[in-house]
Image (cartoon, helix red, strand yellow):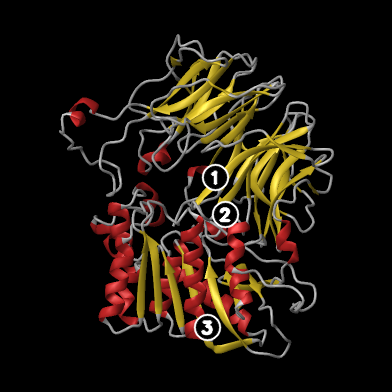
Amino acid sequence: MKRLHGWCLVAIAVALVGLPLASWAAAPFRLDDLRKLVRLSDPQFSPDGKSVAIVVSTPVWKTDKRDNEIDLVAVGSGTKRALTHDREGVSSPRWSPDGTRLAFLANDPKTKQAQIYVLPLAGGDAQRITEAKQGVDEFTWSPNGSRIAYVTQDPPVNEKAIKAHDKAFQVTSGNFLLRKSLAPWHLWVVNAAGGKPMRLTHGDFSLQTDQQGATPLAWSTDGKRIVFTRFPGPYWGPSFHSVIDAVPADGKGEPVALVTQQESSDFAYARSGSLYAFMRPRDGDENNGNAVYVGGIGAACDVTAALARNFNAYAWLPNGRALLLQGELGTHSVLWEQPISGVARLLHLGNVESSSQLDVAHNGEIAFVGSTPTHPGELYVMRSVTSKPRRLTDVNAFVDKLDQGRSESVQWTLDGFDEDGVLTYPLDYRKGGKYPLVLVIHGGPEGASTQVFSPLPQLLSAAGFLVFQPNYRGSTNLGDAYQHAIYRDTGEGPGKDVMAGLAAVEKLGNVDTSRIGVSGWSYGGYMTTWLTGHYDVWKAAVSGAALTDWVMDYTIAYYQTGDLYFFGGSPWTEKYWDIWRKQSPIMYARNVKAPTLIMGDVGDPNVPLVNSFEWYHALRDNGVTVEFWAYPADTHFPGDIVQQTDVYRRWVGWMQKHLK
């Protein structure tokens, strides 16, 4: 489970023209194909708009790691060349304002900490310019290219006492897996050629948290101050009280508040004029979507209010009079042009689904990582907001040779909401046949199932299943009213939505209603446990990283304040005592009959694995067929290719065992 910006396991599908038929000449998408999928991220236009620097991440099965490099892609021809070689932890390419240098993060070979390297594009090796003992987490160039501001964590709290073996620490807002107090992250500046850095901020507040990286730093156009998101401290729990500060770049002054509305972040100046933008949950209500506010002349206002929906990312367009927005619209991931005063316009992307990885060049060209329903992420460019997307890379070309399940959007109505989901057909589908159905429910809950390529539904399709990915109240794709409807109704309402979607699919007449399974990871896991405890239609279930006990999640996970927004108050007070427990699937575990596969990461601070231990023992002690597999990782979902493949193998295999 994760709040906005959070990870959700699957969000896919594709608009269907006609009925999906198998192409027997091609091989299906298989588990082995997972290790071939290349991931693109963080596209960055060169200042002249002729090239895009992008991070290319390739899984290496033998070492169970990812090989990251930065490639330079020519906008005109699509030709590319690698800018980095044999470096670990490569990320965050950032151009100098004059385009002659490219800075990036990479692990120092000796300390293994991320440091800033600067590469001259005219030739020569990249030079490391920082020696931050705790590593660098975020950085940006000054307007004239002479300095670089960056964020790094302070030394460990009570460092001397720890060295003397006095390791006790005070528990405050951290999760139960922490073994020491967290030090805050602060702002520094260094000469772009290297040298002694200068510290700009001090104190108990922090520029990032243990679960959320620093949002981009922003220099004023005159280079005199640096703007940053200020969190109350280094723990994620209180992070909803963030504000935006500015500090003198010469070190001669303390930070001053620029945006005092709490929950504000992701600040960016327009390229011309005095305007700036930032993101904040609409009207300061965490149960609404992220809105984009514009300030600089008078009070800041929500320029996206008319759309009244969630946005994952934004960027200023060059004229400073409009913004580029990215978010979900129904079962699509789309882009809008939003004037600072006026009506937003939806961009025409064809069958391309945009991710939140995007950038806008000085000349107005747009770069983003996008996918189609049957092709994974590639780099796309648009000459302007009125142009069609043009694909520049082909790093996942092998997928085009594979046979894939075709999909369609499914709609239904419930409680006054127009709801939707995505249905993917099995490769061997024939009209008039009856097929087993697997529900794959997205995480979040503030996420959405949209028409982007995703491996799991394709693997299930290849195994002969219909795959249904329902959206439910709390999802980000149908506007604020729908997203907000999960408030104080985290299980029953979303459960009704999913069941209404299932009924809509069954009306199509191709479901074998005696063979239906339900599955999901994170909040999808929560929905799986809720549904198996309330509806006796499931013949199999896969519960991944499931929250089963809201009270425990609030008490030991890193959420804390975040969970409060779902219910309005603490589960340990009389007023809110009952609702937290009534919305917890563990209360209904005795009703479960479906054979259940449980999976999760041992060190997951997001949804601690103790939730799954509770669920496992409750089902086992009540005679339910259950297996529980844990991965020795400290993440919410395994980040390495070997364990990711194992998750999918077990997931599909469980459904094959109990539904085929």
- Binning the other alpha carbons within 10 Å of mark 3 as few (below 14), some (14 to 19) or many (20 upward) gives many
Q: Which of the marked residues, 1 or 3, is nearer the chain's N terminus?
A: 1
The amino acid pointed to by label 2 is: Asp
Residue at 45 percent across and 73 percent down: it is: 542
Left or right relative to 632: residue 527:
right
Picture coordinates of residue 54 (x, y %)? 66, 39
Q: Which of the marked residues, 2 or 3, is nearer the chain's N terminus?
A: 2
Left or right relative to 599: residue 432:
right
Q: Are marks 1 and 2 in contact (CB under 8 Å)?
A: yes
Picture coordinates of residue 236 (x, y %)? 38, 42
The residue to which callout 2 is attached is: 480
Write down the quadrant of residue 543 in the picture: bottom left
Q: CA distance from mark 2 to mark 3?
A: 31 Å
The amino acid pointed to by label 3 is: Ile
Picture coordinates of residue 523 (x, y %)? 45, 62
Q: Which of the marked residues, 1 or 2, is nearer the chain's N terminus?
A: 1
Of 227 and 79, which appears nearest the observer? 79
Residue at 54 percent across and 74 percent down: it is: 439
The residue to which callout 3 is attached is: 516
Picture coordinates of residue 231 (x, y %)? 41, 33
* In the depicted structure, whether residue 57 falls above or below residue 566: above
Locate the N terminus and report the quarter of the image it occupies: bottom left
Front: mark 1 or 3: 3
Residue at 39 percent across and 49 percent down: it is: 562
The residue to which callout 1 is attached is: 282
Name the element at disc 1: helix
**Res. 453 mark:** none
Name the element at disc 2: helix
Q: CA distance from mark 1 to mark 2?
A: 9 Å
* In the depicted structure, whether residue 220 falls above or below residue 576: above
Locate the C terminus and report the quarter of the image it occupies: bottom right
Is residue 203 at least partly visible in the picture? yes
